[in-house]
Structure formats: structure tokens, C-alpha cells
Amino acid sequence: MAVQTFAAIAVGSFELELGIYELSARNGVRRVDEVRHVIGLGKDTYSNGKISYKLVEEMCRVLEDFVKIMNTYKVTDYRAYATSAMREARNKQIVLDQIRVRTGLNIRVISNSEQRLISYKGIASKAAEFNRIIQEGAAILDMGYGSAQISLFDKDALVTTQNLPLGALRIRSLLERIPATAQLHRQQIEEIVDNELFTFRKMYLKDREITNLIGIGDNILYLLRQIGQRVSGDCLEAGALMRFYDLFTGMTLDQIEERFGVTAEYASLLLPAVVVYKRVMEITGAKLFWLPGIRLCDGIAAEYGQEKKILKFGHNFENDILAASRNMAKRYKCHLSHNQYLEQYAGAIFDSMKKYHGLNSRDRLLLQIAVILHACGKFISMRNSNECAYNIIMSTEIIGLSHLEREIIANVVRYNIRDFDYDKVQLEADLHPYGEEQVSQNDITIRIAKLTAILRLANSMDRGHSGKLADCRMSVRDGELVVTTGYKGDLSLEAQSFAQKADFFEEIFGVRPILKQKRRS
């Protein structure tokens, strides 16, 4: 396959970044050039809730230069993503429109969970090291300017991922109004970090052994090398990180600027980052620190290469999304064996109805997650479980899902046991997933209705939570979805529930579901 030149743009909380890449099946992702420009978008957003017009002007000028560089390299495609500073800005729609009009760039604001999965794909592009390190208990610390994400792996499976307000810029903004020495600020940062990590440690680290910590963040590896620490294969022992911490925290900001050749603005962000890495290393008890040197743009390029089938990863990221969902279901005491039967039934219905529903493989994944989480609300209220489940899902980030996708799942779960009202499905997210045409509220409402109809029918097939229809076969013929089972016992509960859900299913798809029990010989 020919080499493709691709550009990735990241609009972050502290800087704008352009990466130029060559993608090929033989060599994978190769970074050709990178350009970075420091800009304090996060400081505006986190302090005032808006991005100032002055910064919009600066951002447009820099992005215009990025476009010129892209044209010089004759890139064939690009992707531009914005993260938390843009995501949390109240005037983001105006800012994005200004950028589009003045530069021609379409920038997509991604959710935190999407951003983290993209970064993980960048790590996974270093396949051999990534697959080896996560075989043992491993944690990924993705340290950004707005927040930090901690994800736990156990034997190649994602156990959990949590976002904490421990970004370097956010911490610095919190401490700016407190006059103190560098030593006192270090202690204050440790207190902030420990407070945020207390609940995480209690919920997720109890009886869990973490051997390896994978660090993603700007210039940590560079700092370690510059200060003289011995780093082998981008890895170092926990003791080396602690020695670096002692050396670094003993320096003033002026000394950091001079020693590492950074600006005063950037030097003030390094202390919070180093403290967070050190405390997470101590709390998890990890023995090895791996720094793959991955930035968001690297992940964007890896994601693009995967979607265009230029690259293949040995790690299955959809399994991570499902694993996170199953751990969430376990946390809320969902009926796991019932969920297994429902996954089987819902998947079979979806596959049998391909000619009629017009949905894609991503929709099938959303359906599967809705099945896994459909009863999580019972943890809070047995009587009002669907509304509680909606609120739980909307309040919980699921790695790899956009905010819109999470809203689809939450609404499918909500309408599983509630009359479907086409006019009352309300969505908060922007209706333009990347790679699709602009979609309307009606498009998403219909998608929710289709997935709801499938979930309802699947749920009716296990009314007694005993898997009576585990052997069933499905086929569509003569306008009917015929579900045939050889179960010899009583199916009265399932048959009654199935018949009740059939009307809505037929309303949505124009196909009548029929349950047939083979006669006893």
C-alpha cells in the first residue's frame, strides 16, 4: 500500500499542536514533523468560562500557518480535535465557526472518554511494548493540562477508567491566589492529589496489584533524560522516579527555566505534573514506569490509520469499552447471567434484521452496552429504575464513547420500560459525529427508537431470568421475525411479555415478531 501523508491537529488547554505523519502498512505511523504553539485557552476557560476574542485571533493566525504547512507537505487528509478548554467554553460554537470561516478547518470537540481512547491507540501503535506491559497489572496515567485520567488494566482487560480534576493548568490556577514558597506549594499540591485519589484508591485499588505505570504527558521523559536519570527503553524503576522528584522539587522556578530551557509559563506547570506522577506511583505501588512519549496527535494519526485499514492493532479497543461497561454493571449489582442471555438475544435480533433496520456495527456496540447497563438503576430505586439508570449512565464516562453515544445508550435504557415519546427525546450533545454528515434530532430519535425496540424484545425473551430461549433460532420470512425454540417447559411468562413488546417492534420496523415453541414429539 502507498504511503499516505496525514495531518493531525490538537487544540489543547495550553497549546496548539500540528503533527505531520506518514502512514503505511509496512512502517505504521511515522512522525515527519511537529509544530507547537503555546496559548492559554485553558486559563481563559477555567477562570472565566469563555475564550477571549484576543485568543481567538491568535488561534486563527496560528491555525492559518498550520494550513500552510499542511499544504507544503501535500497532506491528503487531516483531523482536528479540541479538548477540555474548548469543550468547557460557553462560547465554543462561535469560536469554532470563526476558525472554520477564517482557516477552512473543521475542528471537532471530543469528549474526555474519546480523547483518552485516542491516546491509548497512540500507545498501542507501539504494539510489542504495550501488549507486554498490560499483561501484568498496569495503570495508565494520562496527565493533561485540564485533567488526569487513570485507567487500570488486568491481564489485557480494562478494569476501570476514571477522570480526575488533576490537570497541571487546573492545579496551578487553583494555587495562583495562594502566596507560598515552592516547598509549600509542593505540599499543597500533594494534599490536592491525595484528596482526589482517596476515593479512587478505596474503590479500585483494594486487593489489586499494579506492577507497571504507563505515563502519558508532555516532556516528562525529556526532563528525566536531561536531569541525568538512567532510562532504558523509555522505562525506569520506581526508585529513579523518586530520586528525580527529590531533585526537581528542590529547584526554584528560575532554576527550572534555566536548567530545562523552558519559559516561566511552562516551568510553573511542571511541578504539578511531577507531583501527580509521583503520588500515583506511590499509591499504586507500581515498580516500573514506562513513558512511550505519545502525544494526542500521535493517537489521532493511529486512530485514522486504523479506521482507514492502513494499520492493524493487536489490541481490541471495543473490548475495552465493553469491559468498562461490564465493570460498571458489576458495581451496580446488575444480574450478570441475565445480561449474558440478553446480549445473545439482542445480537441475534440485530443481525437477523440487518435488511430492515439500516444500522451499523457501531450501533450494534451501543445496543450491547445498553443491554449490559439496562438494569443499573435498580441499585438506587427498584420503582424508578429506568430514570435512575439514565442518570447513572449520563453521569459516568465510558471510555471510547462520545457524549452523544452515551446519550443514545441512556435514552434506550430509559425507554426500555417507558412509553416511547418521539417528541420528548432531548439531546445535549452536538449532532455531528466525526466522519458523518450533519445529523438531525430526528435522525438520532429514530436510532434510539430502533435500539429500544430491539432491547425490549430481547428483554421479553428472558422474562424469568432463566435463559429458557438460549437455543432459539431467528429468521425473517413473510414479514415476520420468527423466533423458534426447542424449550420443552413452560414459556407462559416469556410468551406474554413477547406479545406485549411485539407491537412497538412492528411499529418501528414493519416486521412482526413471532415466538414459536416446537411441539413435543
Image (tube, grey):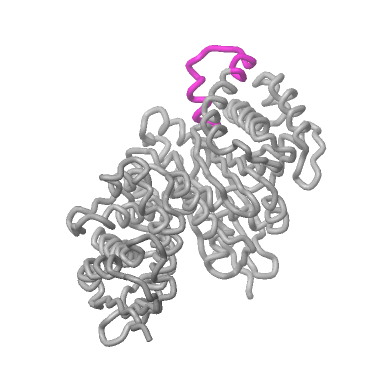
- The answer to whether residue 172 is magenta is yes
* Overall secondary structure of the magenta section: helix
> In the rendered view of the protein, which quadrant contains the N terminus?
bottom right
Indicate the position of residue 331 as horizontal and vertical percent values: 47, 44
Which quadrant of the structure image shows residue 374? bottom left
* Image location of residue 490, percent across then percent down: 32, 70
Residue depicted at x 42% and y 53% = 335
The C terminus appears in which quarter of the rendering?
A: bottom left
Judge from the rendering whether residue 394 lies leftward or rightward of residue 150; answer left or right: left
Camera-side residue of 55 and 147:
147
Which residue is at the front of the view, 48 or 119?
119
Q: Residue at x 27, y 77 (%)?
A: 514
Q: Considering only vertical position in the picture, is 32 above or below 277?
A: below
Q: Looking at the image, which residue sits at the far front?
A: 521
Residue extent of the magenta highlight: 167-187
| Residue 101 in view of the camera | no
| Magenta run includes residue 222 | no
Judge by depth and name the residue closer to the eye, 75 or 206. Answer: 206
Task: From this view, report whether residue 314 is shown above or below residue 140.
Answer: below
User: Is residue 27 or residue 505 the one in the foreground?
Assistant: 505
Is residue 424 visible in the rendered structure shown here?
yes
Point out residue 186 in the picture as x, y percentages from the top left corner.
Answer: 62, 20
Residue sitting at 31 percent across and 70 percent down?
491
Q: Residue 513 vs residue 362: left or right?
A: left
